Each structure stands twice: as C-alpha cells, then as structure tokens.
Image: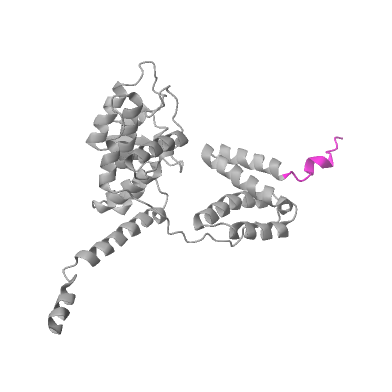
Amino acid sequence: MNVVPLSRYAKPTWEEALEDFLNLKGAEGRAPRTLTDYRKHVTRFFTRFPDAYENEKEARSALLKHLAQAKTPSTHNLRLEYLRGFSRWLWEEGIFTNDVTYKLKKQKNPGKFIPVDKDSLLSLLGLPDLATYTGYRDYCLILFTLDTATRPGEALKLIPSDFNLRSLEVHIPSLVAKTRISRTIPISGETTKSIRKLLSVRHPEWKDNVPLFASSDGLCMLETSWGKRMRGYSKKLGVKITPYMLRHSSATLFLRNGGSSFALQRMMGHTSMEMTERYVHLVQDDVKQEHKKHSALSGMFEEIHRKRRL
C-alpha cells in the first residue's frame, strides 16, 4: 500500500500558488500583458505584507491598508481588480477559507481623457519623414489610430492579412484584442491609401507574419518604443501627445462629428458602455460650455438690464 506523504498536502507558498494561478489564466487565454499585471500586483502586495498569506485576518487588514494608500481611483481599482482575482482563486482552491476582497468595491473614476485639438493633430501628421520607412510607418500608425481608435498594443500586433483594403476594414483578432473578443472596424479611404503605400515599401523578404507597423528590422514594435517616438514628435510640436491620447482624441472627435456611442463602443472594443460613456460625458461637457458661450440668449439679458439701468 502506497502512503501519500503529508508534505504533498502542505500549503503552497504564495509564490507557488501564484504560478499555478497564472498557469490557469494562461490556459484560459488571458493576454500576456494581463498575466504580467497579475504577477506585478500580487507580488507587490505580498512583498509589502509578508504575513498576509499566512493569516487571513491580517490579509484583510493589509489589503485595506494597501488600497487606502492608492493615490488615485485608477490605482485603487487596479489593485483591487488583480488582487480580487487571486484571492477568489485561493478561496476556490481551498487555500483560503474566505475571499478577503469580499464586499470591497471599486471607486468611482471619472477618468482624465485629454483629447488633442485638430490643429495640433494636423501639425503632428506633418512631422514624420515620409521619405523613410520608419517615418512613413509612424505617419500611417498615427493616421490609423485617429481613424479607428484602436489601442496601441493592438495596432502594433496587426499583420497585413488583418486588413481587407477592398472592403475598407480591419479585423482585430481575439488573440490581439485586449479583451480577447475580436472585432471588425471600418477604415477610411485616406487610411486605406496610406496602408497600401506602406505595404509597397516593406522589405521584400518580410512575410505576412511580420506586423504591418513593424520596426525597421521586421520585428514587432514595442509599445514603449512607440511611446518614445511619440515623445520625440511631441517635443518638436511643443504639445504633449501620447499614443493613448491619439485613441482618446479619435473617440471624442468621432462623437463630436455625430457618431453614435454604440458604434464607438464597438470600435474601441469596450465590453460595456461604462467606459464609452466617459467619452460621451466629456463631449456633453463641451456642449454645455459651447451652449453657455453661444446660446441665443447669451448676453441678451445682460444687454436688456444695461439698457434699463440707463
């Protein structure tokens, strides 16, 4: 009769538990960036509060302290989201007797979207050196982002076969999409024309698996590299513009030009209207300001009162 050693049933360390958790999430198809974020947030928490894993009461207290020290709603919500996922898994696996994030809620986050004005965007499009591959690639990537509001991390992974230039569409595959939900987005004629030209100047040995917006050596350009190039353009322009600010600008301009919030939700790949509504509210605030300045009654009663005083 084989005897199972007691050590087999010993409670794993939090590092061992985290590896099992990440393997599970990887098998579920979670994006590499998501797995990296889980690792970062869980490791940071248990490094700061080493006793939290051994004592659930201490874990709850430490978690509340960890969340209270977040300086912004965004930081608070990210910490809670990733630690909640791990905590629930510990509970489901029987490692914890409770979910220590039970009843904890995210903070309301109005967001801080900073759209760029049209004049600055037009000036930005004039900065890349169109006589070079990298310059023309940058120009096309800026144009593509403004046209589709695609996330930088998604755009940089797209390959030529993801584009149907005849039907003026781009397909964001599920493995590329941040939410792991595929979507198809229309693209304008101007963007299509630019992409055709970009394809024509690619290195002849690059195969279809080389991303459309590849680095000069045919590799997938990193988000950090794209951010660095945008900082260079921003410095020349004298206006701060990040890759995500292009996405935000695309969304707000789409709404200001009469686009529907439901179409925008589909374009941006939001799984719910909650995120999209933040852009809607931003545009509505613009409308309120414009109404205050340009209403037919603006200044009318001030003029009437002035005449009465005379």
Query: Is 90 on the left-hand or right-hand side of 225?
Result: right
Q: Residue at x 39, y 36 (%)?
A: 232
Q: Quadrant of the C terminus?
A: bottom left
Residue in the picture at 26% in, 61% down: 287
Q: Is residue 2 magenta?
A: yes
The x and y percentages for residue 54 are: 75, 52
Which is nearer the eye, 310 or 53?
310
Q: Is residue 7 above or below residue 197?
A: below
Is residue 210 depicted above or below 81 in this figure? Answer: above
Specify the farthest residue to the bottom: 309
Residue 307 falls inside the magenta stretch? no
Q: Residue 221 in the image: x percent, y percent? A: 44, 30
Q: Is residue 176 visible?
A: no
The dominant secondary structure in magenta is loop
Residue shown at 53%/37% (left/top)?
A: 32
Question: Magenta span covers which residues?
Answer: 1-13
Q: How is the image coloured?
A: one colour
Is any part of residue 65 visible from this angle?
yes
If the image is split into quadrants, where does the N terminus sit?
Answer: top right
Total numbered badges shown on the rendered structure:
0
Quarter location, residue 239 = top left
In front here: 117 or 261?
A: 117
Left or right, 247 with reference to 187: right
Name the residue nearer the viewer: 45 or 22: 45
Q: What residue lies at 43% left-to-right and 36% top-to-bottom?
A: 228
Say left or right for 158 vs 199: right
Is 68 placed above or below 157 here? below
The residue lying furthest to the top in this view is 205
Q: Position of residue 245 (x, y in %)?
A: 37, 46
Q: Position of residue 195 (x, y in %)?
A: 29, 29
